[in-house]
Amino acid sequence: MLDALTSGSTILLVLAALAAFAVVVTAIRIAVKLAIRIGLIAAVVLAALYAVGVVSW
């Protein structure tokens, strides 16, 4: 049992899985930040267009 946990291929597999998880978490965090920024910019642009009368509801 201990040999299976300490074998080189298993350790490499675990490290690769951890690296993939870290990449996914980082990508999600960047995507959320971009989505928030794009949403804020869109809200400001729509508010400006509404203020000048280009867009009306």
Image (spheres, helix red, strand yellow):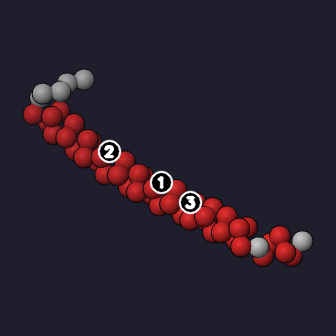
State the image quarter where residue 54 is shown. top left
Based on the displayed image, in which of its 4 quarters is residue 52 positioned? Answer: top left
Depth order, front residue of 49/28: 28
Label 1 is placed on what type of residue?
A: Ile
Mark 2 Cα-neighbour bin, 10 Å: few <14, some 14–19, many ≥20: few
- CA–CA distance in space, label 3 to label 1: 12 Å
* Residue at the front extreme, as displayed: 8
The label number, if any, that marks residue 28 in the structure image: 1
| Rendering quarter of residue 20 | bottom right
Q: In this view of the protein, which residue sits in the foreground, 53 or 3?
A: 3
Q: Of marks 3 and 2, which one's residue comes earlier in the chain?
A: 3
Q: Which residue is mark 3?
A: 20
Image point 50% across, 60% down: which residue? 23
In the rendered structure, which amino acid carries the disc numbered 2?
Gly
Residue beneath label 2, please? 39
Residue at 30% x, 46% y is 38
The kind of residue tagged 3 is Ala
Please tell me whether mark 2 sits on a helix, a strand or a loop. helix
Q: Are marks 3 and 1 in contact (CB under 8 Å)?
A: no
Q: Residues within 10 Å of mark 1 (few under 14, many from 20)?
A: few
